[in-house]
Image (spheres, grey):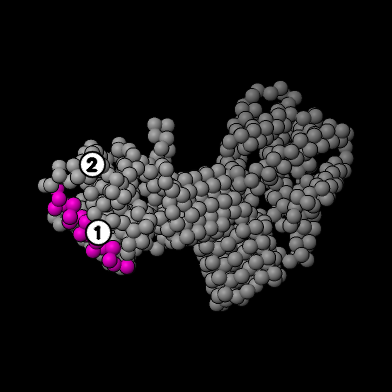
């Protein structure tokens, strides 16, 4: 099936072991509950070969350790080289486990071994010990013991990782694997000590058994750390996965956009450089044993999130999650600060109290997602970000701090919550001009930093006269607020959304409550100071009338957007705020704009 167009093909529940999908187009293909990887017969053959190699390596490894005892107790060789070898091995293992990369550690230890050996050669030895042949044999024996020890050690680690990578449900079969491995290792040790039986056999046996068995816990430790993704030992795991994926199912360079691998068995499968945009991995098994270079699956945290769908209270700050499928995921209290979520799907996801500050959501699908209590400071959205059916009672426009435990809640009135559809209307970009959206080098988050916004909603239509008077009364009562109406948008006379600019330190909740109180009193005729107010602002009557007329004209349209006092001019990627002389610009219907570019 290599290089084929298999768009929409249904492979669900099929056995796809060793099938080659390289370079194929598999858009929206169904791989639910498929089984991929290596065939059982080939897998059994490889396991048998691994145990044979394990026996041979243990034999060589044990024999190397036996020679150390030979050097220590032989009258014909120089024991100092045995101690040099032991010391170099101990230093290498300690550094290897505690800190350094294995290859760098090995190089360092060879230098240490060589330095110690030179020092021994320079020590004046007794005449009985000075023998050129013995000296050469001792040095060569020590060197080959050292190289043999770490060669055997590395192969033992690799075999242990191979067994776990290739065996399905390894942990269920672990007792059997451990028993077979133990028998194989003991057989190798026994065989190594039956070679060249001589008078030093007892000392050599002790050295062989002790050094070999004491090395096995270190082998197991390194194996577990490698499988857990420890970068120091990751090349062991990478090597095993690459070899196994070469004989398993391959999707290398395939286009798997919107494909579904729910519940699939994916061990020993090759996804290298595949297009995995919005691919579903929910409950996929053994994905950590697949080859995934060049995809977002390389990151273990992302892989776990996609498989389990559970990101509750986890930190994903700064991660590249572009194109990830997080449909219906539980992301309650998760942090996505500065994360890249463009082109991802968060449809139906629970983002309650999630931190989305400075997150990129260009073209992201948030349909039916829950955003109640989310922190959306300077998040980057575009016209193709989907907000249909959003469930949201309130959001925060800033991250919470000790100094500000109430980080710009919306709606501003803390006694109110968003009604159905309010959030979609509210989140329409604050500065809504065609020039801004058509400019491809402006980051809306930077534009938004110039504004502190007060949002006011009318859900059952609006009385233009009462609204105009209530706004003017609010401006006069709180001149320090810097209140200026920025935009009006809505659908006929059903629901109206005002956005006004205010100063940073103003109590927006108080302003919202006062506006609602004044507006409702004016409408009901109970505003006691109405006549006095109108008489006192006679010189402002023209401004109130203009605002009233603007509203009356706007609400006669089926859908409208009006910029009242401010506009934004774009020139070669820069933006600046300018006043407009009249009441503003008017836009009827839906405009089609280009989306802003994704921020690097």
Q: Residue 553 in magenta? A: yes
Question: Label 1: which residue?
Answer: 551
* Residue at the spot 75% in from the left edge and 50% down from the top edge: 171
Question: Label 2: which residue?
Answer: 529
Out of 10 and 24, give the one closest to the viewer: 10
* Residue at the spot 58% in from the left edge and 71% down from the top edge: 29
Q: Earlier in the sequence, mark 2 or mark 1?
A: 2
Q: Secondary structure at mark 2?
A: loop
Q: CA distance from mark 2 to mark 1?
A: 24 Å
* Residue at the spot 17% in from the left edge and 55% down from the top edge: 545
Q: Residues within 10 Å of mark 2 (few under 14, many from 20)?
A: few
Q: Is residue 36 above or below residue 175?
A: below
Q: Is residue 219 above or below residue 249?
A: above
Out of 158 and 24, give the one closest to the viewer: 24
Left or right? Give the position of 413 relative to 182.
Answer: left
The picture quadrant where one finds residue 124 is: top right
Q: Which marked residue is nearer to the observer: mark 2 or mark 1?
A: 2
- Image location of residue 234, percent across then percent down: 60, 47
- Image location of residue 94, percent across then percent down: 64, 33
Q: Secondary structure at mark 1?
A: helix
- Image location of residue 110, percent across then percent down: 61, 38
Q: Residues within 10 Å of mark 1 (few under 14, many from 20)?
A: many
Highlighted range, magenta: 540-558
* Residue at the spot 68% in from the left edge and 44% down from the top edge: 224
The picture quadrant where one finds residue 421 is: bottom left
Main SS, magenta region, reads: helix
Out of 155 and 575, give the one closest to the viewer: 575
């Amino acid at each position: 099936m290599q290089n084929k167009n298999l768009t929409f093909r249904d492979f669900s529940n099929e056995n796809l072991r060793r099938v080659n999908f390289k370079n194929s187009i598999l858009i929206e293909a169904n791989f639910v509950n498929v089984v991929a990887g290596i065939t059982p017969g080939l897998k059994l053959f490889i396991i048998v070969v691994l145990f044979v190699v394990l026996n041979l390596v243990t034999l060589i490894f044990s024999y190397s350790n036996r020679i150390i005892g030979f050097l220590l107790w032989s009258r014909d060789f120089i024991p100092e080289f045995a101690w040099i070898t032991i010391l170099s091995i101990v230093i290498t293992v300690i550094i290897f486990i505690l800190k350094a990369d294995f290859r760098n550690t090995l190089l360092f230890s060879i230098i240490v071994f060589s330095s110690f050996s030179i020092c021994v050669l320079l020590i004046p030895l007794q005449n009985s010990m000075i023998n050129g042949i013995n000296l050469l044999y001792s040095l060569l024996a020590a060197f080959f013991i050292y190289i043999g020890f770490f060669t055997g050690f590395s192969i033992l680690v690799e075999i242990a990782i191979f067994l776990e990578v290739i065996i399905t449900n390894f942990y269920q079969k672990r007792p059997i694997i451990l028993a077979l491995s133990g028998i194989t290792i003991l057989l190798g040790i026994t065989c190594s000590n039956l070679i060249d039986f001589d008078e030093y056999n007892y000392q050599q046996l002790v050295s062989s058994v002790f050094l070999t068995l004491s090395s096995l816990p270190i082998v197991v430790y390194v194996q577990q750390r490698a499988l857990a993704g420890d970068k120091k030992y990751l090349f062991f795991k990478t090597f095993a996965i690459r070899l196994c994926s070469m004989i398993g199912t391959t999707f290398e360079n395939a286009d798997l956009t919107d494909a579904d691998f729910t519940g699939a068995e994916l061990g020993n499968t090759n996804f290298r450089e595949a297009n995995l945009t919005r691919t579903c991995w929910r409950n996929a098994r053994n994905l950590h044993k697949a080859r995934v270079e060049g995809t977002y699956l390389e990151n273990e945290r992302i892989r776990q999130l996609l498989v389990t769908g559970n990101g509750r209270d986890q930190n994903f700050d700064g991660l590249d999650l572009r194109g990830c499928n997080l449909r219906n995921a539980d992301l309650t209290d998760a942090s996505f600060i500065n994360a890249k979520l463009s082109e991802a799907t968060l449809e139906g996801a629970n983002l309650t109290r999630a931190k989305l500050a400075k997150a990129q959501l260009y073209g992201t699908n948030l349909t039916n997602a829950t955003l109640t209590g989310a922190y959306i400071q300077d998040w980057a959205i575009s016209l193709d970000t989907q907000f249909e059916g959003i469930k949201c009672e309130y959001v925060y426009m800033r991250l919470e701090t000790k100094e500000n435990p109430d980080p710009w809640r919306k709606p501003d009135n803390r006694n109110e919550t968003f009604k159905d559809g309010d959030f979609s209307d509210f989140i329409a970009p604050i500065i809504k001009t065609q020039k801004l959206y058509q400019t491809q080098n402006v980051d809306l988050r930077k534009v938004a930093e110039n504004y502190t916004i007060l949002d006011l909603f009318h859900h059952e239509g609006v009385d233009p006269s009462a609204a105009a008077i209530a706004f003017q009364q609010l401006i006069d009562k709180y001149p320090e607020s810097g209140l200026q109406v920025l935009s009006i948008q809505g659908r006929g006379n059903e629901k109206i959304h005002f956005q006004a600019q205010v100063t940073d330190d103003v109590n927006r909740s108080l302003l919202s409550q006062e506006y609602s109180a004044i507006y409702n009193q004016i409408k009901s005729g109970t505003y006691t100071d109405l006549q006095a107010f109108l008489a006192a602002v006679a010189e402002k009557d023209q401004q109130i009338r203009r605002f009233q007329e603007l509203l009356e004209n706007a609400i006669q349209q089926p859908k409208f957007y009006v910029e009242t006092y401010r506009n934004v001019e774009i020139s070669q990627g820069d933006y600046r705020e300018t006043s407009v002389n009249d009441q503003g610009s008017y836009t009827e219907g839906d405009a089609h704009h280009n989306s802003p570019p994704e921020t690097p």
